[in-house]
Image (cartoon, rainbow, N blue to C red):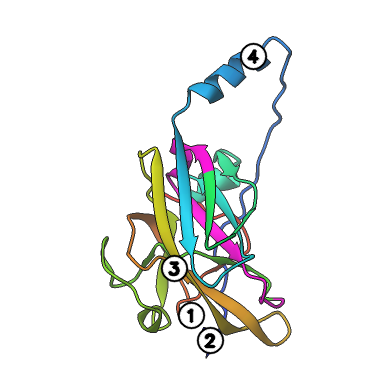
Amino acid sequence: MNIRTTLAASAMATTAVLAGSLTMTSTAAPAQSEDRAAQPGTQLTFTVEDCEGCEIQLTSALGTYAEADAGKVDIWSSGTRTVEDGAVTFTIPTRRTWGMSATVVAPWEGFTGYKTTVAWRYNGKLQGDPVTLEEAVTKKKAAACWEGVRSREVTVPLVVEKVRVRGVKKKVAGSIAFVPETQSWLKPMREVQDGVLGSQDVNICH
């Protein structure tokens, strides 16, 4: 893997405040379980070369920043899964793929102060366009939000490469993560530096 010098992207995600509490009774629990079972599910597999041990987590949040500040955005997160033999698979409710972001924590990363986030689309690219590492490190904007799918099984290749980034106190090893074929995306387009997209909080997608 090539080690390139880059500056870490400033995290621009909005802090989502979850308000209110959920009271569950024994009579409501069976109905909720049935609802979950009835939801269409998607088996989402990421194939990732040269990233054994990388930890990937998914988050879905659809709404506006104002709704997020008011605690009105339904935020969902998966558990963390580890890449083994070049792949990692999640089984999730299909509706959670809409407005989904994905973070990657690689074994080589230093104290960056953010989580590397997958870029589903870079500025100047349209859905289906190929993306190389050489192109990715020149980009200034990227989308952290996936439009999602309705399929029951989806495989998405990811590129994760080791790069040098500006950490909290000094330059450290970091990562750039993107899809080699531009996917359908949702707003906003966030500013990045040298293609590196980082998040300190939930990405609110709309």
Does the segment drawn in magenta span residue 154? no
Report whether 23 appears left or right of 103: right
Q: Which residue is disc 4 drawn over?
A: 30
Range drawn in magenta: 91-111
Are there few (<14), some (14-19), or many (20+) residues within 10 Å of tag 1?
many
Q: Which residue is disc 3 drawn over?
A: 178
Distance from Cα at disc 2 to Cα at disc 4: 51 Å
Are there few (<14), some (14-19), or many (20+) residues within 10 Å of tag 2?
many
Q: Are marks 2 and 1 in contact (CB under 8 Å)?
A: yes
Q: Which mark is residue 6?
A: 2
Q: Position of residue 204 (x, y in %)?
A: 51, 52
Count numbered badges in the picture.
4
Q: In terms of sequence position, does the residue under pointer 4 or pointer 1 come before the other?
A: 4
> Disc 2 residue type?
Thr
Does the segment drawn in magenta span residue 105? yes
Distance from Cα at disc 3 to Cα at disc 2: 15 Å
